[in-house]
Image (cartoon, rainbow, N blue to C red):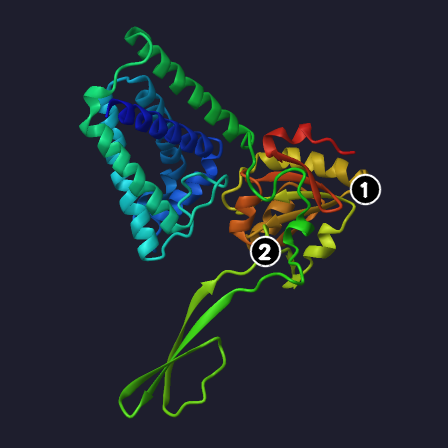
Amino acid sequence: MKIFVGVARIFVGILFIISGFIKLNDPIGFSFKLQEYFSAEVLNIEVLVPFALVIAIFLVIFELVLGIMLIIGYLPKFTLWSLLLMIVFFTFLTFYSAYFDKVKDCGCFGDALPLTPWQSFYKDAILLGLILLLFFNRKLIAPIFAPVSHRWIIFLSFMLCFIFAYYVLMHLPAIDFRAYKVGNNLLEEMKIPKDAKKAVYEYRWKFDRNGEEVLIKNSGAYPNVKGEYVGVETALISEGFKPKIPDFSILKDGQDITKEILSKKKLLLIVAYDLRKTEREGFSAIKELSGKALKKGYTVVGLTASGDDLKKEITSKFSLKFDFYQSDETVLKTIVRANPGILTLMNATITQKKHWGDALEIDLK
């Protein structure tokens, strides 16, 4: 049992450290996921939405440090109670999301390892079992290193986590796990092969025949059956091919100009998913950068999900020499974790991606 507890302790500790670090690398992305959980459609606690980023930072730092505390054996009673309460809550949350089909990806490992709702629940259920094992055998958890050093290890861990969180907030995630990372060609990531596997659905048609419900199942063709049509339900049997970038588009006056824009040899993209929430001080640096880019032959394009009034307001206030086009807010949040953020592309390949605070670091070749 002592060996089994030791292995479980190391496994759970490392998993919490990895999970916490991945989310700490991208706290803004995790805050978007928390906002989804707090929404009216899921937990209906929208009062917490404005505090999502603060909650995200403290939650992932606590998760990471708990993993370290478990491994070194610091305050085992407090550590295991904290782990148990946390995993019970997240097991309930992932089951709720999976059973009621509320959230498609729990965000447990960020964009590094997307999990389906049921995969997330099974993962949490296994962790719950291991943590219960540790909880009821905590006397077997012996400290590693001299106990006098534990407080310093935990203090240093907290400080390093806060420093790292501050760095990625002021810049961008240190490791980019998304399809929009530097080096990726957006047109290639959006491409669907001609022989790509197509999704298979089952259609369940309901008819009323003299008060009796008739159910017909097929692959989509309207059934030739007598009776009054009631409704149809669809069920996914097997998923088809999905490109890494399935939903990126650029619209101008309702027309899709995505390929036209991405085909430009030298392109500077200014991404501001919501101009109402954007950090307006960033547009002074963007104005200077975009002016230099235009002189060097770049096509400069702004992308936002905001309406025309806000576009005109920002363009006029900062005397910007480029236009904002329409794109999906969720996609823009995924592209860059800054509002505004900056990308340079060469023939649709992302060559640089920066927070607005690092605009002066953009190399306009």
Amino acid type, callout 1: Gly
Whether residue 96 is visible = yes
Which residue does the image show at 38% across and 48% down from the upper left? 119
Could you tell me residue 360's position as x and y percent?
68, 28
Callout 1 secondary element: loop
Callout 2 secondary element: helix
Mark 1 or 2, nearer chain start: 1
Q: Which mark is residue 240?
A: none
Could you tell me residue 333's position as x and y percent?
53, 45
The N terminus sits in image quarter: top left
Q: Which residue is mark 1?
A: 297
Q: In front here: 126 or 40? A: 126
Amino acid type, callout 2: Asp
Could you tell me residue 168's position as x and y percent?
51, 29
Which residue does the image show at 38% across and 39% down from the upper left? 52
Q: Quadrant of residue 131?
A: top left
Q: Which class describes the residues within 10 Å of circle 2: few (<14), some (14-19), or many (20+)?
A: few
Whether residue 44 is visible = no
